[in-house]
Amino acid sequence: MKQRSNDKQILLGYNTQIEPNKEEFAPDQTPVKTNLPVSVTLRQQFNIKKSTNEKLYITNCIKIDNTLVFTDWNNKQLIICNVDGTDIHHIPLSYKPNYMTVININTVAVSCFYDRTILIINISTGSVTSTINTSGDCYGISYNDNNLYVVIGPSIIHVMDLTGKVIRTIPLPSDRIHDITVDRDRLVCIDTTSIYCSLEGKLIWKFKKDKYQDLVRVTTDDEGNVYVTDYNINTVVVLSNDGKHHRKLFTESDGLNKQWGIYFDKKDKILLVCNVHDAFLFDV
């Protein structure tokens, strides 16, 4: 347990000292429709390992049509497979991948924070098509409307094109943000204890509960609901799109065990969740 906790702090890229949040963001009281998911069914569970000798450390996951992609931080590689867990193969990388976003049906972008590098990878050919060097440690990454949104520092977001040209900078509501996702025109981001929803630096809402102290990844569905993984208590929590309602979606009894990655496929309404070496697909 101690080793896993240390690994987690390394992967998040900061120490355990808590820093105060910034207070410069004014809340927006605009009402938003609440529509939490009412039915979630396990579709598929499978082991990502090809052999018992593999020592994987999966930190993120995405689903593109019938293809699943996982970042294996421990072995500097992407793991690719079908949605049923078959045809597992690997794309070796020069850096340890951590955060990931979908560019198109064949392409993903991966941030490697300690190396201050973003890799654009063609998952069909298994090749790195371009490399972007960032001005600071790069954490969460999300692609929207032809631009990459990248957490730098982790106190600001650089909005950049696919060549790495920074178009603008967006402030963040906390000095410890590590994962983000762009949902329509909103930015949803997390630190270890809180979830924030903002619009171009203006805070819309913030969610914080004492029992959630180890949030690691975030995604949103087609209704704007927010899904987060909590590493230490083996829980997936879903929040309404206004941040006012929440409930546990999955726990350790559902097979979660130090889960990291989570990704909602808006097209097929499927939620992908992964532990360090196995994965779950849920119909929502």
Image (cartoon, rainbow, N blue to C red):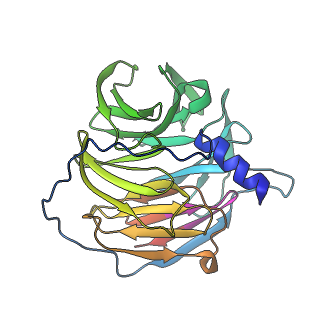
For the record, the magenta segment spans 272-280
Residue 252 % position (x, y): 63, 75
Quadrant housing residue 96? top right
Quadrant housing residue 237? bottom left
Can residue 34 be seen here? The reply is: yes
Is 147 displayed left or right of 16 in the figure?
Answer: left
The residue positioned 40% from the left and 20% from the top of the image is 164
Q: Quadrant of the C terminus?
A: bottom left
Please give the count of numbered marks on the rendered protein.
0
Q: Quadrant of the N terminus?
A: bottom right
Residue 247 % position (x, y): 41, 76
Can you say whether 168 is above or below 60 in the image? above
Q: Is residue 277 magenta?
A: yes
The residue positioned 53% from the left and 32% from the top of the image is 121
Is 272 displayed left or right of 258 in the figure?
Answer: left
Residue 102 % position (x, y): 43, 42
